Image: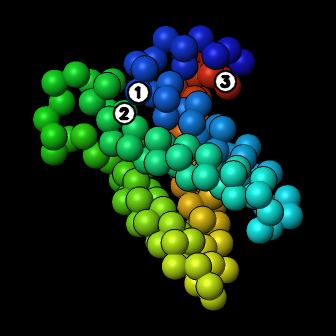
Amino acid sequence: MSLQPLLEAPWVIQVHAFAAMAAFLLGVVQFAAPKGTLPHRTVGTVWIALIVAVTVSSIFVRPSLYPGLPLEKWFSPIHAFTVLTAFGVLSGVSFLLRGGCALKQHKHPFTGIFIGGLIVAGALSFLPGRIMHQVIFGA
């Protein structure tokens, strides 16, 4: 195991990967910690910011690897998670802003983001040929 392939990757990939790892760890904390407390709200705000960073950076991963790539080739099937995550963030934040009985509903889109965007899409990042595969298993 070596972080070298990730540290040598374009900066957008580093932002994407490190924000995803931090969001995963904070997500685990959020699931385990008491709900509705000031720490829950604070960590949740940081988690949302990290997820937004992961989502936005995901758009630019392929063009950072292949400069000059035409726009229509920027996206692969894994980018379906980008769209779903963006929708989930908007839904979850909308529930939080509405407050009242809608407040409890924010957990559904955020749990979906954690499972789909961080666990499933994260697992796909370890497929052969990807940078995270090189980090864990070598070249």
Q: Kindly report the distance in space between the C-alpha atoms of the residues bearing marks 3 and 2.
A: 21 Å
- Quarter-wise, where is residue 81 in the image? bottom left
Measuring 31% from the left and 25% from the top, which residue is drawn there?
64
Instruction: Identify the residue under disc 1.
Output: 12
**Mark 3 is on which residue type?**
Phe
Horizontal and vertical percent position of residue 103: 62, 78
Q: Nearer the viewer, residue 41 or 31?
A: 41
Q: Secondary structure at mark 1?
A: helix
Measuring 63% from the left and 58% from the top, which residue is drawn there?
114
Disc on the earlier residue, 3 or 2:
2
- Quarter-wise, where is residue 82 in the image? bottom left
Q: Secondary structure at mark 2?
A: helix
Mark 1–mark 2 CB contact (< 8 Å):
yes
**As displayed, is residue 117 above or below residue 3?**
below
**Mark 1 is on which residue type?**
Val
Horizontal and vertical percent position of residue 79: 37, 51
- Quarter-wise, where is residue 7 in the image? top right
Residue 119 visible (yes or no)? no
Can you tell which of label 3 and label 2 is closer to the viewer? 2
Instruction: Identify the residue under disc 2.
Output: 61
Left or right placement of residue 138 versus residue 127 in this view: right
Mark 1–mark 3 CB contact (< 8 Å):
no
> Which numbered tag is attached to residue 137?
3
Horizontal and vertical percent position of residue 78: 41, 51
